[in-house]
Amino acid sequence: MNRRTAIRNVIIISAGAGLLPSCVGDDKSSIVLKNISITGSQEKMLAALTESIIPKTKNFIGANDLKSHEFLLTMIDDCTSPDDQKKFVDGLEAFDKLSHDRFGQLFTGYTAEQKKELLQAIESKKDVSEEAIKFYGTVKRYTIQSFTSSKDYMTDIRKYKIVPGSNFKGCVPAS
Amino acid sequence: MDDKNTFDAIVIGSGMSGGWAAKEFCEKGLKTLLLERGRDVKHLKDYPTTNMLPWEFKHRGQIPYEITKDNPVISRCYAFREDAMHFFVRDTEHPYVQEKPFDWIRGYQVGGKSIMWARQTQRWSDFDFEGPARDGFAVDWPIRYKDLAPWYSYVEKFAGISGNKDGVETLPDGEFLPAWELSCVENHFKDIVSKNYNDRHVIYARCAHITKPEPIHIEQGRAQCQARNLCQRGCPFGGYFNANSTTIPWAQRTGKLTMRTHAVVHSIIYDETKGKATGVRIIDANTKQATEYFASVIFVNAGAINTNLILLNSSSKRFPNGLGNDSSLMGKYFAFHNYRARITAKYEGMLDKKTEGSRATGAYIPRFRNVRKQETDFLRGYATTFNANRGGRGIGSSDGLYGEELKDKLMDTSGSLGPWNVGSTCMGETIPKATNYVNLDKDKKDEWGMPLINFFVAYDDNDEKMIKDFMEQYTEMYEKAGFTDIKATDSKQAPGLDIHEMGGVRMGKDRKTSLLNEWNQLHECPNVFVTDGACMTSTSTQNPSLTYMALTARAANHAVELLKKGDI
């Protein structure tokens, strides 16, 4: 049994034999991953969750404009250990279960109000499983990284220059 | 002898010191062969990431897990990141044996580690050269500061060193390009330290950056450093010194240089009837084919550990234990720098001030322990870095925030700056000992047939005491400066991660107790010179590259004189 199959099996088992539609695995995610395997509806959930964490606003792009969920999946897939990958995949399940328990459906189907309520509950760690909190923390960390390291953010907000020039001043007024 | 394989001089290794040997020989008209075990890296052309923007890196700088898992040693190196990982040797490519843990950080390419080095360039003084003789360890250096001083000047002018004339006896002044400013809090610390201690000096850390190009740098095709701080990728301006932008092209333009890449040096060929070395045997890294090259003089600049390896592997009837190794000391008295300890703090003063822009260095505190006499329960001492910056307008914690509120916080650059972050790294001298050594593994060989190097190098009680003293002294100095939240840490990192490995083929006055004479010639085979880290009799505390460069230029010019006189 290869690792992908093993992880898939873990997903199915931990999901309680396909109680949740996102776990059946007949819908494929659009992004190609080497180590972890997620479904199309999980991908959609991650897109919705990252956008809830950093939404598009009038003035500035949000997580979905940056495809932050794809960045997050790439980082998990390439830069974390099999252990952490398993925790993440398990976390997807835990988060789906939490979503389902709260409002009887997956996060993707939530209204804006319901999304806020769930995120508020997780942020304040109220009646939420440790697993879901950790999973959310991982998603949030990478969403912030995707945002603050993006071209738009670094150019427009941070005014990043690859050639700053040799004009260091050791002591200038702070304001 | 095959004429196309015959040269006046052969230099083994194209990095920090080898580049200098090649430059000196070519300038003096010697037909020179520069051997490099890795690939060519041409200035500008072979810096693939140099102009990449942060968001263009797939993993934003992070190294993928598949690589870190299989390469734990190189993954511990601070500069082994997504933008420069192609310049570092992976553990899996070139294995070695760790009888005791040793993080061996390597760069196998033209330019070697001079591409990714930290660019700190502090001179030695006689307090360093006289250390072993005064304190009774290792052996006396066969040279003193006055022997090297003109050569420090010589390499500094060509390389481009930024610094201030500080007039500090422990860290002699050199030929300096302008310095960047120190920050307000660095100057505050300087004042506090000079008021409280008459023998401690906070100065500007001299570095190999062209802050203002001189004609010689423009002639090299190099321009002013733009303070990008992306040096490890190779610099499009040639703003810092590396062999690729400076010494090697200078050698090439003479028309006297032949560069042979992918050449793994197997051994140096010794001719018993002539009583000298006649050439070098290499194995092609790709084809594994052996070739011999011949020359009157051979410089070994393979990097301290590989220099030991090549010499130990150069066995003959005359030298069964390695070339010039009659004393059986080769590989022994190996040393390094103790970089385990660090101290950090905050400063809540001067909050109406900040720094602006970017620079490529910070402040430096030369060794103040045991300088004029022995005064502590450990030998020698440590230099330290000192940096004080306000960490930009930090985002701070995002706890409890999500949605628009979080986004607003991330986008708010008008918020108040945090306190000053200050920090110092301890750079301790280690004492070379017979029990710290490298040797050739008896059984294991690499795919080119070279024995693997085996490390028996460790910290000792002197190092532990020094760390303790650094933490005590710096806590006291930081407290006097009004710093708060002082935290001293010991990384417990293995020897080697300092990337200042030295010794094994030490210089000395006596052929019974050293391998090299005062001109870096093997006592027993004087047409072979060693001028990289392997030659170091003791380590002092200063970053060693500048000293290797000066020793190399000095030795190469001496070799040319000896050749002219027919003495080698």
Image (tube, coloured by chain):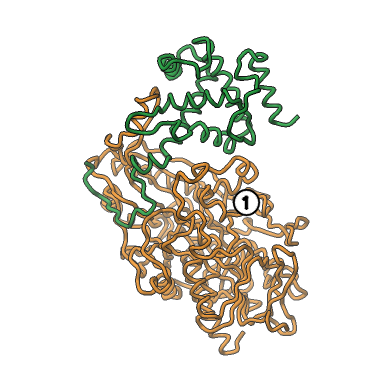
Q: Chain of mark 1?
A: B
Q: Could you tell whether B511 is left or right of B195 in the image?
A: right
Q: Is residue B364 visible?
A: no
The x and y percentages for residue A70 are: 53, 34
- Rendered view: B269 above or below B339: below
What's the colour of chain B in the image?
orange
What's the colour of chain A in the image?
green
Quadrant of image for the C terminus of chain B: bottom right
User: What residue is rendered at 67% in x and 26% in y?
Assistant: A7
The x and y percentages for residue B451 are: 73, 60
Q: Nearer the viewer, residue B504 or A17?
A: A17
The x and y percentages for residue A65 are: 44, 33
Read off the residue under disc 1: B90
- Rendered view: B391 above or below B167: above
The x and y percentages for residue A137 are: 48, 26
User: What residue is rendered at 53% in x and 19% in y?
Assistant: A132
Q: Nearer the viewer, residue A19 or B212?
A: A19
Circle 1 packing at 10 Å, graded few (<14), some (14-19), many (20+), is many
Total numbered circles = 1
Q: Nearer the viewer, residue B293 or B257?
A: B257
- Rendered view: B429 above or below B272: above
- Rendered view: A160 above or below B501: above
- Which quarter of the picture shows residue B315? bottom right
Three-letter amino acid code of the residue under disc 1: Arg
SS for tag 1? loop
Q: Is residue B100 visible?
A: yes
Q: Nearer the viewer, residue B80 or B510?
A: B80
Specify the farthest residue to the bottom. Answer: B565
Q: Could you tell whether B535 is left or right of B198 in the image?
A: right
User: What residue is rendered at 65% in x and 23% in y?
Assistant: A25
